[in-house]
Image: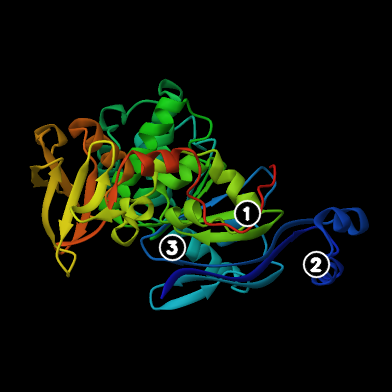
Amino acid sequence: MSAISIQNVDVIFGKNTAKTLAMLDDGKSRHQILGDTGDTVGVHNASLEINAGEICVLMGLSGSGKSSLLRAINGLNPISRGKLLVQDGDEMVDIARCDSTTLRHMRSNRVSMVFQNFALMPWLNVLDNVAFGLDMQGMNKTDRHQKAMHQLQLVGLEQWADKLPNQLSGGMQQRVGLARAFAMDTDILLMDEPFSALDPLIRTQLQDELIELQQNMQKTIVFVSHDLDEALKIGSKIGIMESAQIIQYDTPENIVLNPATAYVQDFVAHTNPLNVLKGHALMTPVSQLPGDEFGLHLDLKQAIRLQLDQGQQLIKVTRNTTELAMQYCSPEQDIALLSRKAITITPPDIGMRRAIEIKHHTGLPLILAEQEKVLGILNDDNFYHALLGKHFNTNFESAAI
């Protein structure tokens, strides 16, 4: 069961909803609708499934509809048409049609939110800010302070518990906002560009902390961002929006490798693909390696060849006529301990940054193998291919954003 199921959702801001929906069905643009009805189309025909424990990142340019869709999940924006189902135990509650009592229950117990501007109460100290939602739930002071302190420990702010928000830096205030949301113990967390106002260094640090917290707590997170590098870093899935519509919803790797439109490709073109792609996405498969009677060519410049048996298991690797030693590098292994005189074998899902580090350390190409079967190789050509943006699988021309 999905934690959140968004089904053909429209969000209209204005007084002529019925006419606006009819114009949308006739294919009219947002600009035409605004001129004719005065209504603003916030979201049009959005559909996606968010599984429990995923981080779904909604991204796009300003006005694309990402925040409008996020705020529909907890009922802050009214849903004009469609279904928006949020898991509540064994049931799915339709936020578009539930009564006010059910909506209050969902906001208090199922869905919490972190805002861009922190939204801390300046008259309360850090501990009471974190405990505020628990107070609204009716929890007694001792229990809520104990729970709030535990969350402050998770974000490294326990020593600041008695301070006021204006005594904290912007990054620390945002951590308080995170702690408050996590203290509510809701399974679903909405985050509306929470790091966008922070300095780059602090922003990167909080992204890392969010990933670490998520590994421990396994929340379902919907995160709004206008930064694709941020989306690729933290997202399990990414939904890219343009003109109030979701134009692609996929894994970070597929977004980079297989952009659905020229608009998405132009977004991807401005990112570093090595931050998200795995070795198997960029490797040269064994079937495409040139060869001769001495074996398959790993690296023509260094005269490195490999010999495989009929099951694609590795027999040996040679440079000129000298056999090279072989070494396996696990995901946890310290690269500095690898021999510079041995060819390195890695799993096919190795991150490209790590693959480059190994290549730089040993000066030799990498062999990608799974269950002793060689699948392909990574050499300088593969790395350059990615860095030059030649890894796209598309049938359309780029369009300027």
Residue lying furthest top: 167
Is residue 291 at least partly visible in the picture?
Answer: yes
Q: In screen coordinates, is 378 left or right of 82?
A: left
The residue mark sitting in front, 2 or 3, is: 2
Q: Nearer the viewer, residue 157 or 306?
A: 306
Quick one: SS at disc 3? loop
Q: Residues within 10 Å of mark 3 (few under 14, many from 20)?
A: many
**Which residue does the image show at 85% across and 68% down from the upper left?**
23
The reply to whether the C-beta atoms of the residues labelled 2 and 3 are less than 8 Å apart is: no
Q: Position of residue 344 (x, y in %)?
A: 16, 44
Task: Name the residue type under label 1.
Answer: Met
Q: Position of residue 160 (x, y in %)?
A: 31, 27
Q: In screen coordinates, is 144 left or right of 113?
A: left
Q: Position of residue 108 (x, y in %)?
A: 46, 59
Q: Which mark is residue 241?
A: 1
- Which residue position is annotated with label 2? 24
The residue mark sitting in front, 3 or 1, is: 1
The reply to whether the C-beta atoms of the residues labelled 2 and 1 are less than 8 Å apart is: no
Quick one: SS at disc 2? helix
Query: Reading the chain from its start, which is encountered first: label 2 or label 3?
Result: 2
Q: Which mark is residue 110?
A: 3
Residue lying furthest bottom: 90
Splitting the image into 4 quarters, where does residue 337 fall? top left
Q: Position of residue 168 (x, y in %)?
A: 40, 24
Q: Residues within 10 Å of mark 1 (few under 14, many from 20)?
A: many
Q: Residues within 10 Å of mark 2 (few under 14, many from 20)?
A: some
Task: Name the residue type under label 3.
Answer: Arg
Locate the C terminus and report the quarter of the image it occupies: top right
Q: CA distance from mark 2 to mark 3?
A: 32 Å
Is residue 132 at least partly visible in the picture?
Answer: no
Q: Nearer the viewer, residue 261 or 375?
A: 375
